[in-house]
Image (cartoon, rainbow, N blue to C red):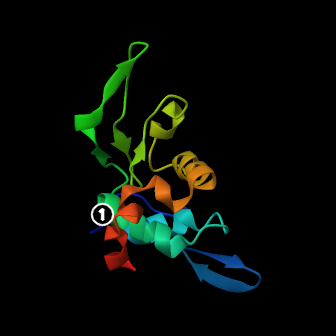
């Protein structure tokens, strides 16, 4: 599956350290893997597998609409993005531009506080088929 997004510079190639580096356009799980690799303390292959199990690596995915609730006039409980981050009080910023580094930083912060167990696909083992 391939979806929107890329990691590349505006030019087709650039010179770095005397060598020409080709810019590569990434999509889907390759794009998610590249974004996850900005943090070295979690296993990016496990997180990519979680993303694939949660959303098929779709950064535009929205889920868990059946478990939403309202608090202080705002809807919570749904999940967004490739890692299906659940929007709860205090996580409102996680829903802004789910293709941004900020979204992945939100996911990383959740991982720092809860570990892989924050994702149901980790708990039920369904991510394993994508490793």
Judged from this view, the residue extending furthest toward the right is: 17
User: For this view, does 30 lie left or right of residue 10?
Assistant: left
Q: As rendered, which of 1 and 65 lies closer to the eye? A: 65
Report which residue position mark 1 lands on: 56
Quarter containing the C terminus:
bottom left
Q: Quadrant of residue 18?
A: bottom right
Judged from this view, the residue extending furthest toward the left is: 66
**What residue lies at 57% left-to-right and 72% top-to-bottom?**
43
Q: As rendered, which of 101 and 39 lies closer to the eye? A: 39
Q: How many marks?
A: 1
Query: As displayed, is residue 26 above or below residue 101?
Result: below
Categorize mark 1 by other alpha carbons within 10 Å: few (<14), some (14-19), many (20+): some
Q: Secondary structure at mark 1?
A: loop
Could you say where residue 69 lies in the image, as x and y percent from the top left?
A: 32, 25
Q: Quadrant of residue 52?
A: bottom left
User: For this view, does 75 lie left or right of residue 91?
Assistant: left
Judged from this view, the residue extending furthest toward the bottom is: 19
User: For this view, does 31 lie left or right of residue 107?
Assistant: left
Query: As displayed, is residue 38 above or below residue 103?
Result: below
Query: As displayed, is residue 43 above or below residue 36?
Result: below
User: For this view, does 104 lie left or right of residue 73?
Assistant: right
**What residue lies at 56% left-to-right and 49% top-to-bottom?**
110
Judged from this view, the residue extending furthest toward the front is: 123
Could you say where residue 5 lies in the image, as x and y percent from the top left?
A: 41, 58
Q: Quick check: can you spot residue 24?
A: no
**What residue lies at 35% left-to-right and 69% top-to-bottom?**
125
Could you say where residue 65 lies in the image, as x and y percent from the top left?
A: 25, 37
Could you say where residue 51 lies in the image, as x and y percent from the top left?
A: 39, 62
**What residue lies at 36% left-to-right and 34% top-to-bottom?**
77
Q: Quick check: can you spot residue 44?
A: yes
């Amino acid at each position: 599956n391939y979806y929107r997004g890329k990691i590349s510079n505006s030019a087709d190639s650039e010179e770095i350290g005397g060598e020409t580096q080709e810019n590569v356009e990434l999509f889907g799980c390759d794009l998610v893997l590249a974004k996850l690799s900005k943090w070295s303390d979690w296993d990016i292959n496990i997180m990519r597998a979680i993303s694939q199990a949660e959303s098929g690596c779709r950064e535009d995915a929205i889920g868990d609409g059946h478990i939403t609730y309202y608090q202080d006039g705002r809807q919570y409980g749904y999940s967004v993005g490739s890692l299906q981050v659940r929007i709860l009080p205090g996580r409102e910023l996680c829903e802004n531009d789910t293709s941004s580094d900020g979204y992945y930083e939100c996911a990383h912060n959740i991982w720092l506080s809860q570990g892989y167990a924050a994702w149901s696909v980790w708990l039920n083992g369904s991510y394993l088929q994508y490793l």
